[in-house]
Amino acid sequence: MYDSSLFGLLQMLYETLKNEAKFLLNVGNQIQDIRAEINRIQCFLQDADAKKPEYETVRNWIADIRDVAYDVEDILEKYTHKIISRKDRSIWKENLALHNIGMETKDVMSRIDNIKRCMKTYVDTGIRAIRQGESSSEKSQWLTRSYSHLVDDDFVGLEEEVNKLVEELISEENDEFHGVFAICGMGGLGKTTLARKAYRHDDVQSNFQAFAWASISKQWQARDVLQGILTKLEPKNRKQINMMMDDELVKELYKIQQNEKCLIVLDDIWSTNFWNSVKHAFPKGKGSRSKILLTTRKKDVCTHIDPTCFLFEPRCLDAEESWKLLHKKAFPRVNTPDLKIDFELERLGKEMVNECGGLPLAIIVLAGLLARRPKVYEWRRTSQNLNLHMSGESFEQDGGIHGVLALSYYDLPYQLKPCFLYLGNFPEDQKISARRLYQLWAAEGIISLEGNQGEETAMMEVGECYLQELAQRYMVQVELEETTGRIKSCRLHDLMRDTCLSKAKEENFLNTISPQHLVQPMRCSSSAKAISTRTLRRLSITIDNDVQNYFSTDDKSFQHVRSAFFFPRQKGTSFPLPIFQGLCNNFIMLRVLHLEKFSFDENLHKVIGNLVHLRYLSFRHSRFQKLPSSVGNLKYLQTLDSRVNFFSYLTLPNTIQKLQNLRNLYLPPSHQNTYKLELSPLSQLEMLKNFDTQVSPFRDLFKLTKLQKLAAVLSLELDEMEEIIDHLTLKTGRLRETSFRIYYRFHSEKDLNLLKRLLGCHHLRKLDLIGHISKLPEHHFFSQSLTKLTLRRSGLEVDPMLILQKLPKLFTLSLRGNAFVGKEMYCYAQGFPLLKTLKIQGLPNLESWKVETGALPNLIHLEIEDCKKLEKVPDGLKYLTKIQEITIIDMPDTFQNRLQEVQGEDFYKVQFRKYFDTHKFPKIKSKMLLSGHMFGGLMQTISPSTVPKEWKRL
């Protein structure tokens, strides 16, 4: 099989040669010759990829092509930058640069000639270029299919096992004898799916009082696991939990399990060492009704945790169940409910599914491969390829389930292979933001607009199509946006990730360094002996404690690295200045630098400006207070994420206006700029987040004509508000999604007309209004796209529910801090059809709240806080069947006593609610109000630059 990393590289290289030709005219025809040869090689590889011949035959010259392509790109990157930056250079230096590129391109052409001779020999052996790609219309039709099956957890043949596990979990007898329940079996057997089914089962939800799910990767951190579990059990105490010492975490988690009946899932435990590190946080014996449900591949882990544990070993699917699952996934029956499949298809399908060994993961991945090939001859060819992999003729290491997963990789179109391999950069079990992934693919040139119809096609849309196809093939697991149905994030199953890393290493696409709980972390200097540092292009390192243990400050072997991902196992890990300087001096060809959740010196060093080839730079959740002016040197930068830690008040230099290739700009949530940050020159911006009119001139927005997504804080006068709303309502703009926090008092009729125009913006998605509103506009003035609304200090005298309940797509509503000053609220039948989250806080006069049957049919989360006169929860709460969590904070004792499990008058309204946080009762949980925190109606203490938490995932 061919080295897939070449395809994206060659496409990117071809585009670079084409786009930068105007800067390279003085080197004669050499660049044009290379461009033509690169195009021929690219076409040959695409054609040969369709035939999928044996890998061993061409391994050597494929490696040569890869090295040449990378070296050509290095030459172009360096010298194009020098020529573009020649303003202050002498003619002699310019001629010297052109001479050097001429000599290096001559050498490259010689190497390409040798490769061509090898290719000709290979072609003469009988391989012909046969294209087998789909038509654009077929591809488009495939990519627009429904996603419903992607989030469907249904599986075949294990319904009885689920019921049995649920029965054991809720059995009162087991309260005395079993505190630990273990699901044990080989990878791909469906252990996590089985645990999730039981975890979400109605009987389990009504039997336990608090729930937490923790995924335990191979690179677990005990503190992170305990902190995550405790946060899920007590979500409203997140701030206090984050500041607890380790022993405090253990004690608090232990106490909660003693006081409440909790179900805690520990998914995918790999070793007994994990349990030894966390066991003191989990009570055992008759003193606790809480239970642990764990999944693992190793039976000794189960018995080590609890020799008397209830051990559940799910079986593999039998032949009939395997075929049923394959049939269900390969033929989703989107438009043909009465589909009858060909007899030969069924025969081939049953033959192939038998090779999956009854493992659901293998069957589902195979189904994703077959779903795109409805013809008999296509299934027959797939069967032959599967037999080849299973037989071990070419890939002995890929037997069993790995053979199926490897085949699904080899079956990918050439442009998708590097997209899939790129996922290996991220740690195990990590959710990967879809938008971030698209930005990274674009930064590396893995995706391009080549072959897409229309010049207006955005790079992000191409990335979305690619991720959609990986999801349709069941190679990634995706989470969808509730409001849009688009992919929000993705992750890899651990076995699929093993396949990804194996192929990435095999093709020298990516090198990863992940410490495995060693006493001394791995050093790059030692681990690098096993890899070829000369051609090392991508590096992903998980840092354990000390960054200095991973690479030397003067190591020149990293000068060809194109992307570097650094993941700290502990948030706030220090990144010392000498190491940062070494990174910026030695990784000179970097396109992607991912440095998140580290602590740097107060002022980031100016050496960051040396990385002139960067396309993507992220410091998200890191700690430092000043970005140096040298960041203006990064003229190729496409994405800058400066969303540092919330309490790191960051100063940004005005030199960022030099970044005229910037497409995605994430400004910090808190600023301390003493001057206006000018953004108007950034004409290529497509996404701008955390824009603040207190920090940047609001008219800068008018010059960002390509802007598609905007999240902004507006604190303006009337004439300025009119001006900006005039701009927002223009039909000629490209804006598709906007989110605003607005500080303004809508008193007069003119103010209210302004509010109506704002609410009517078709691209408005999220809105946080802070200030008095004399009258809420009628529902028909609101955008049909509005999904989140927060009202603070509005002082509304008329019940806002009468209007807001008519908004068809509202998913989240928050009424806070005197938003409503009346006494009664009503939610009528059919009101709030899609609302999932409702938060009511600080309504001082509210005495009665009534909910009719049929209102709030999809409500999942309800929060009531600091409404001192509210007497009780509404009677209609008992009809809200989808509620998973009810949170009561800082309410009077009389209100909370009605919800007591014993003798509580209103307990019947909430006792069968899913995920009902009864550990919030009967005691009132105090909440820490930090300076600048947006909760509790303390908006007067907030800087206008503070950005709502819910905008952090725009």
Image (cartoon, grey):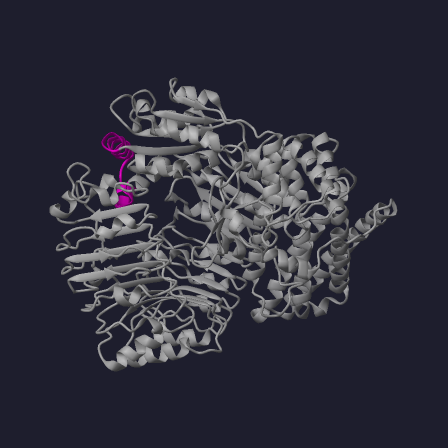
Q: Is residue 891 visible?
A: yes
Percent from the top left, x then y, of residue 350?
67, 35
Quarter that holds the C terminus: bottom left
Between 16 and 145, which is closer to the camera in this rendering? 145
Q: Camera-side residue: 870 or 583?
A: 870
**Residue drawn at 21 percent across, 57 percent down:** 850
Q: Position of residue 236 (x, y in %)?
A: 26, 46
SS majority, magenta: helix
Q: Is residue 253 part of the magenta span, yes or no? A: yes
Q: Quadrant of residue 833?
A: bottom left
Residue at 60% x, 37% y is 324
- In the displayed structure image, the side of residue 60 where residue 846 appears, left or right: left
| Range shown magenta | 234-260
Query: Looking at the figure, which quarter contains the N terminus?
Result: top right
Number of disc labels: 0
**Is 430 contained in the magenta span?**
no
924 lies left or right of 619? left
- Residue 224 shows up from this direction: no
717 shown above or below 805: below
Residue 844 or 337: which is nearer the viewer?
Answer: 337
Give how far across and how far down residue 594 sits, in percent.
Answer: 48, 50
Q: Nearer the viewer, residue 427 or 333?
A: 333
